[in-house]
Amino acid sequence: MGLGAFFTSKLDEAIGWARKYSIFQYPFVTACCGMEYMATACSHYDIDRFGAGLPRFSPRQADVLFVVGTISHKMAPVLKRVYDQMTEPKWVVAFGVCTCTGGFYNNYATVQGIDTIIPVDVYIPGCPPRPESVIDGLMKLQDRIAAQAQRY
Amino acid sequence: MDGAAMLAELRARFGSDVVETHEHRGDHTAVVTREALRRVLAWCRDEPSLAFEMLTDLTAVDYVKYPGRQDGPRFEVVYHLYSLTHNHRLRLKVRVDEDDALVPTAVDLWPIADWFEREVWDMFGVRFAGHPDLRRLLMYEEFVGHPLRKDYPIDRRQPLIGPAS
Amino acid sequence: MAQTTQREFMLGEGSGTGSGSQNLRVGVGPAHPAMHGIIRITTELDGEVIVKADVEIGYLHRAFEKDCEEGGYNNAIPFTDRLNYVSPLINNFGYCAAVEKLLGIGVTERCKYIRVIMSEISRICDHLTCIGASAMELGAFTVFLYMIKAREFLWELVEDVTGARLTISYGRVGGVKADLPDGFAERTAKAFKETREVLDEVHRLLTGNRIFMDRMIGVGALSREETIAYAITGPLLRAAGVPYDVRRAQPYDVYDRLEFEIPTQKDGDNYSRYLVRMAEMEQSMRIVEQALAMVPGGPINVDFEGRPVDPAWYVDRGKQGKTEGLLLVPITLSPNLLGSERPAHERINAHDKRVVLPPKETTYGSIEGLMNHFMLIMEGNGIRPPRGEAYVAVEGANGELGFYVVSDGTDRPYRVRCRPPCLPPMAALHRMIEGEMVADLIPTFGSVNMIGGELDR
Ligand code: SF4
């Protein structure tokens, strides 16, 4: 390995490490899962320990989109718009079975999985997922962020 | 006034405009004609011995698949009234056919009827004559049909974006 | 250009503000940072004053009413969990009460008490979330953290009883899923102690807080008459001075035997609503404490001829077909089915084989039990109320929660209508915010406590 390549790969690692611990999330909270999201964010489970403590309520300042709760067909264009407004690099977490597959709801009003609309990086199943599994999902996302090729 | 007395009073006052009255499990119901509906509602609100200040609920039922009622009027619009003063309840109903699904509005009697009526229009396609702004309440404008009708299949999706699957 | 004072500018009166020419239209939502819940408010602004507002809902419409028509009577219970997902237990019991009324059956004494206890715990959770979230939107993040901390203690209680934190599906037509676990009263006492500490702290942080008061007092007010005309119930109506509470006006379960007050205020503004909610939490705790002291039937004694029985042994015997006589012995399957074993099951469920599923021991241990289970679960069988309709109202956390169920005599509800307590305040929201500043929209919306699942169903 040449010296240049060595430095690039080390730099990649360093940036990946930095990125994975400085997640700014945009909680796109619509439904019941939001209650569990609140619980995860607060003192008992404290998502801040994983460097994801600060929600950013503007899509332009966020890099992880947490889609929390059922997405109805009426809401789908809004979700797409929010996703499009986020700047690269960006990741998407599907929180709860409603967002993963439609889950509990299979009827005329609900979208059968947000991956029919936007790309998803991590799926957290559960109705709603317990805070433990949310944290597990977050750690999976962090691994993914650290391992991927970094663009800067 | 107890429920039975209320129904008797309604019958005495509105005669043949009260199509039917009954009591089931302690709930008292009167079915009235569409022509008399507004008079009955206004009287229920203003008559001091009834004093129904609150329209707690307004909804509809589609009877097209109800055993024994397939041929009758298709929709029933149901009003649930409650009186704070006397602490009693009453249910009023009006029956309408599918091709003439039009009921006079109650918005000027109780402003809450505004949204309830919009919801009934959205879900059942029953229109309300005199409603100031009869838009859909829950579904989007592009949606075709009325989902709570018995003949609307539960999984017929009409997505705005994404696959119809 | 003439000098425009700040106040004139805010009111859109001075020069350079575009006054007289055109109002500004601003859309708030559906995904807005300072609002929990997805609705869209299209406002027309004159300067910073809202002249006209149009509220659009339906972004969380999940076809609750249609889904209920698709399955049996008990299958609708999980859907009711997700109506008001902050206090799902009240929805469960409201729906069950409506079906029970249709069937014309009652529930056991112990079950009534359990329903009261669990409803009140749920109500506290709801108020905690409401106040916490709306305080956070006003910048008081600490309050939010404290409130959620208290809610977590209560959720632990809920989890002990129901096995789930949020989507509990605990109600059953004719009873509840499981009995209260051992030691529940002590754990409740502990959780309430923590909750009271939190409430005390919040009182000190908010109730006399200058900023909080300035933003809440006199804001979002609705007169008594208008509140009634809009059929608004619950804390909002009580904040306007009307002591209407379904628990007192038309007592269900055992509320008529318990002592509690109905807190009221007279101004009908956001601050009054906050005070009403704070006071109601204390009353709810009082109710739970009384109910726990009065609930009949003590803890369950697990015994078989005086000896505790190993559940694994019981299951093994059942698998080998050695079931003779087992139907009669009072043994339990704990810990696997905590609280839903036979002795507990009989105390908390109505004795009606056409409605209530048999306890698991009976299902697995005897052919009669299996048949009974089968008859209630299979399509075309199940619970079949006689034809008719019933409306039942219970006091939800946001007001009168009504269920109107129509039966056509089959095993599926013909129509289930939920009368959502937070739809009327949302319909009146434009009346509360018109004429106020844009910034006042946030506390007003918070104090209405809109819950999407219940509003849009
Ligand atoms: S996954 Fe379950 S808890 Fe989450 S939004 Fe959907 S129905 Fe609600």
Image (tube, coloured by chain):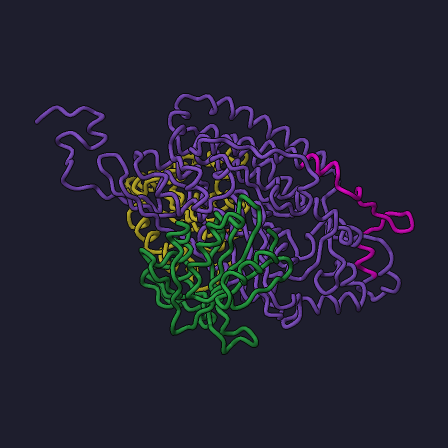
Look at the picture and state if C99 lies above or below B151. Answer: above
Report whether B46 appears left or right of C280: left
**Quadrant holding the N terminus of chain C:** top left
Is residue C74 a member of the stretch shown in magenta? no
Foreground of the two, C247 or C65: C247
Q: Position of residue B61 (x, y in %)?
A: 49, 65
Residue C135 makes an appearance in the image? no
Look at the picture and state if B120 lies above or below C380. Answer: above
- Residue at 52% x, 74% y is B65
Q: Position of residue C405 (x, y in %)?
A: 57, 61
Residue C156 makes an appearance in the image? yes
Chain C, chosen colour in render: purple
Chain B, chosen colour in render: green
Q: Position of residue C80 (x, y in %)?
A: 55, 54
Furthest residue to the left?
C1
Residues in magenta?
A: C288-317
- Residue at 16% x, 29% y is C14
Look at the picture and state if B80 lies above or below C146. Answer: below
Foreground of the two, C55 or B74: B74
- Residue at 29% x, 42% y is A60
Chain A, chosen colour in render: yellow
Foreground of the two, A115 or C258: C258
Q: Position of residue B80 (x, y in %)?
A: 51, 55
